[in-house]
Image (cartoon, coloured by chain):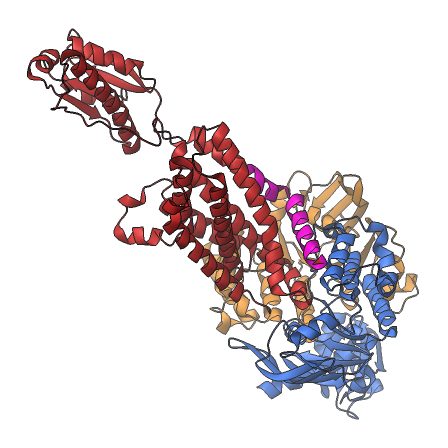
Amino acid sequence: MDKDNEIIVVRELTKKFGNFTAVDHISFEVHRGEIFGFLGANGAGKTTAMKILCGLSLPTSGGGTVNGFDLCREQEKIKRNIGYMSQKFSLYADLKVWENIRLFGGIYGLSSKVIREKTESMLHYLNMTDLRNELVGDLPLGWKQKLAFSIALIHEPGIVFLDEPTGGVDPETRRLFWEMIYETASRGTTIFVTTHYMDEAEYCDRVSIMVDGVIADLDAPATLKERYKAADMDAVFRQLALKAKRQ
Amino acid sequence: MAVINVKQISKRYGSCVALDGVSLQVNPGEIYGLIGPDGAGKTTLFRILVTLLLPDEGEAEVDGLDTVRDYRKIRSRIGYMPGRFSLYQDLSVEENLDFFATMFGTSIAENYENIKEIYAQIEPFKDRKAGALSGGMKQKLALCCALVHRPSVLFLDEPTTGVDAISRKEFWNMLYRIRRSGVTILVSTPYMDEAALCDRISLIQKGRIIETGTPDEIVGRYPHQLFGVCGEPAYPLLKFLRTCSGVLRCFSFGSEHHVAAEPGVLTAGGLQAAIEGAGFRNVSVRDIRPNIEDCFMELAKENDYGQG
Amino acid sequence: MKGFLSFVRKEFRHIFRDKRTILIVLVMPVVQIILFGFAISTEVYDARVDIVGNWSDPSVRRIAGRIEQNHYLRVVSVYETVADVPERFRKGLTDVAVCFERDFDARLRHEGRAEVRLLSDASDPNTAQMIVNYVNGVLTDAQSDLLLKDRPEPASEASFPYVQYMYNPSVLSAYNFVPGVMGLILMLVCSMMTAISIVREKEYGTMELLLVSPVRPMSVIVSKAVPYLVLSVVNLLTILLLARWVLDVPMRGSLLLLLLVSVLFILASLGLGLLISVIASTQKTALLISGMGLTMPTMIFSGIIFPCESMPVILQYFSDIIPAKWYIIIVKKVMIEGVGFGYICQEFLVLLAMTVCLLSVSIGLFRKRL
């Protein structure tokens, strides 16, 4: 396969905490421009693996590359070249909308001029031009998530990591959020996303399901459903996750 | 007589209206679901019912007792599991359970029967610190702590948020077992698919109850005709469907798009022809029954218009 | 009662399972006492003294000899011209210059008086003051000696005042610091730890569960207070033992009286802690309020470092509302002066009133709902 076509390449990635193996020799690739769903039950090792991929934690053994940078040696470069958004931490609630944009633009080293342009186009795209002076904490959750997503993309990273981006959001906003994800992916940005909503797994190009620190299966949702003779991804997930042994 | 009776409760935080004239009745021995997204007012309503907050307007009764006047009596009769994991992380499983039992003037031994089924699953880890438990086990421990004094009403505020699909399923099975012992359960959740698991539900959005009934009743009241549409590529198809005449709304639901139309305006065959005509591949269109999520989105729209 | 005991047991578990808490609660007092007692002492050892005068003058030599004997002072240089002194200060070669007038011995002998001038590099005023005091002490002794020896009749025209430090003859700073540190530590441990332990329950959401249980808020408060009361008494005893046997601070008054007053002060601190826990909603806020809002004013206004008497009147009034100030006054009186209850009656009543006030206000504000 064309090496340049892979934005994430992971080989035998392992992370141990004491004698507990959180991530156990996983290997996979993520293609450039695809929406990659990273699923797993609580405690399956999802978060640990994601931390390593974002350059926040070092693997115990094995390795790989993200956007061409080495997971073990080029963590700083990885951090500068990915976008990250999580449900838990996204934006500063006590800063205004434009202040958050400027802050994150500054963090990623964009010039003031670029930040100004980005702010305008972003607010326009999100229909939030009138809200630029609102405190982020005062925005409804759905708006906050959309803004956070846009800000995660401010430095035009090749890949963006979304950690349960839609938790607790109302059904319509959740779908509008996924439409934003589609838009972004169609412009060539790779999306790496975790979620507990199994219907969202269906929206991904390919899905990996982690069980007990290993990748139990990885394929397109349609293929997986066929393989496990399941009506939907929920049933696929349940079949795989039920095999989990560790608590 | 209703075990929980909420009459026209309103609650404001400054200029933000958290609850706006909420009323509901929960019958003895049922699992009643309060379904809505974050920020809809679920937690505020729970806190009023468990006597932690005072309503600005309206009143509420739990087990025939007024939540404001008789708050002390209510507190000894209810079990409450707050939205966040709220146990002592530095105490062991057993110490936590023992502490909450003593707080209610009882002991684990006295009520072992009541919690046995759930506690048996975490008892092997009883010396482990609560902070070191996995998500599913924490949840079981919290449920044990809420049940240890044999409450007659159980309040569970978003017990399954952030919990994976397997643990959620398991949790609901536990709720059914608890219901069998006669406990009335009020549970809130942002997951629409859990609505079907409740006996009766209320959909809540922006501080208002927008619909109440059994899941079947609510689905039966859905006003539009609904089609399930598949085709490739999926996202352009979604955009295309929204431009079709006769289509009111269109959103993706997993691998399918749900297309809502006025009854009698569109047919599955006609829609299929139109989509294929636009060049989409592997197209299939079928008539479908709405689910709670379809209903919620429909009702939420109306509520938005109602509020201006 | 069973519920109460299990609550107290739980509190002790929280304390003993968190290494940081243990560190703050039990180790910090010891460290502070030792730090204040030895390292941060205001005593000056080996202050350098220049003698400016005629070395052949017998009285000058005698006084210089006495200065040399004093173990706080050391003669580093002898020369004749006062004009050299500033240069030596600038180079940091000496701390104080003792300048004798010309023909010092002769004048003293014939006129009965002679002048000595002390020049001090007062860029550090506290140290300078200390050193000058030492030198003065030596001069005073020397003078009375000289006079006694040369003129049998008592001197009426003594040029130096005679100073005696009655309750602290060797002017040990530990006498000041020990009561101060006692006040500070009891205050910190009680109010900060109580506040944090209550606010932690708020932050982790367990307060919600406690409130929803039939337990009365009053018993939540009491069971939070008991463990810290016990720990504070342990701290108090540790400090007293260290003070007595390591820092040689005497215990002149009644130990029982001191303990009684201390328990009263501990209760006042618990009240303050409760008050903070009502205001703060996160542990960080609680820590900040107790750190900045309690510790700082206590350090500044209770007379540990700066004497209250030298503050502007407004600040003096302000210092009156700080419980630690009164407690420290009482401790000094009881420990160092050894007075009985009659002498501390006034301060005791002030402290009592404050305690009652703080406890009732904070218990009143403690919410039975969220």
x then y, percent, for residue C210: 66, 63
Dividing the picture into quadrants, the one containing residue A188 is bottom right
x 50%, y 71%: residue: A131
Vertical placement of A89 versus C364: above or below?
A: above
x 12%, y 14%: residue: C104
Q: Which residues are magenta?
A: C2-27
Foreground residue among B205 and C193: C193
x then y, percent, for residue C326: 39, 48
Question: Furthest residue to the left?
Answer: C111
Chain that is coloured red in the picture: C
Question: Furthest residue to the top?
Answer: C56
Q: Is B12 on the left-hand or right-hand side of B211? A: left
Magenta stretch encompasses residue B283: no
The N terminus of chain B: image quadrant: bottom right
Magenta span: chief secondary structure: helix
x 65%, y 51%: residue: C11
Q: Is A65 on the left-hand or right-hand side of A1? A: left
Dividing the picture into quadrants, the one containing residue C137 is top left
The mark total stands at 0
Question: Furthest residue to the bottom?
Answer: B264
Foreground residue among A175 and A168: A168
The tint of chain A in the picture is orange
Vertical placement of A72 versus B150: above or below?
A: above
Foreground residue among C137 and C252: C252
The C terminus of chain B: image quadrant: bottom right
x then y, percent, for residue C182: 47, 41
Chain that is coloured blue in the picture: B
Q: Is B51 on the left-hand or right-hand side of C69? A: right
Can you see residue A232?
Answer: no
